[in-house]
Image (spheres, rainbow, N blue to C red):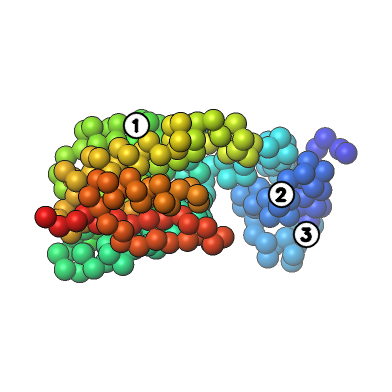
Amino acid sequence: MADQLPDTLGPLLREARDRLVVAGVADPVLDARLIVEHFSGTTRTQAIADPERRIDAGIVAEINAAVRRRAGGEPVHRILGYREFYGLRLSLSPETLEPRPDTETLVEAILPFVEAIAARESACRILDLGTGTGAIALALLSAVPTANATGVDLSAGALATASRNAGQLGLAGRFTALQSNWFEKVSGRYHVIAANPPYIPSEDIGNLQDEVRNFDPRLALDGGADGLNPYRTIAAEAARFLETEGRIVVEIGHTQRNEVCEIFAAAGYVPGGAFRDLGGNDRVLVFERIKP
């Protein structure tokens, strides 16, 4: 196999794909196309219509390096530096979890409530705990123009990424970044408290796919001995920050529904809905507080 990739578009795509096939990458055709299109600024249509299109040597070198990284196991969106989520392009950083399509289930689950509150009160205040890239908060803000959100994270690097994403999407005026360990520095009351918390049991981290274990930050994965510690914290402390008719919405691991429901029930919450992800697994739970 030649060390350097070809410098015309069609052969470049084919060789990139072939290298990823040899490396055992799960979707070599898609990943090769994403890498080549991203670095060369070309489109799928151009690759079909003009396969002999010349690609600058410097760009070929960048593509070559990216293909090597992908062949070495680095996730393609980490290489590109962004991922699409709910129709939004979100920048990634080493301090952020890579947002995944299953988390869009959370946005869809709570969006009707956010819309209803915004219509009734001309505003909806959202608290996004462990905001990471800002994915959940920014998706909701993009869908509801009168909503505003505070994104909480322990990581300063994650908050910088979330703030950058808010700015790039024109949502900075309605998004506030707050460095806090859960509710420690939170103030005020919110209509929605949302979280995709770390929910992997500590001892299971080593069994995760290499692309998750080696590239997603452990802070965003490790949920303690049984994976449930963040839910205990949220259930115990959220009431002081939740409006009377507010909702809590959380993403869960697909086997955790009963345990998480029990944690919130013990803290005085009742179920407000359960939602499955694209694979049919339990993924999102909504809770509301029992009225006094």
| Real-space Cα separation, disc 2 to disc 3, in angstroms | 25 Å
**Residue that mark 2 sits on:** 26
Q: Regarding mark 1 in the picture, which secondary structure is present there?
A: loop
- Quarter holding residue 284: bottom left
Which quarter of the rendering shows the N terminus? top right
Give left or right: position of 80 versus 188: right
Q: Amino acid at mark 3?
A: Pro
To which quarter of the image does residue 46 belong? bottom right
Mark 1 vs 2: CB contact within 8 A? no
Which residue is located at x 80 percent, y 37 percent? Answer: 4
> Viewer-proximal residue, 214 or 52?
214
Question: Percent from the top left, x then y, of residue 11?
Answer: 81, 52
Mark in the foreground, 1 or 3: 1
Among all residues in the image, which is located at the extreme left? Answer: 292
Q: Relative to 170, does residue 97 appear above or below in the rendering?
A: above
Residue at image coords 63%, 40%? 209
Q: Earlier in the sequence, mark 1 or mark 3?
A: 3
Residue under label 3: 51
Q: Is residue 62 visible?
A: no
**Label for residue 154?**
1
Which of 107/91 is in front?
107
Which one is in front, 98 or 248? 248
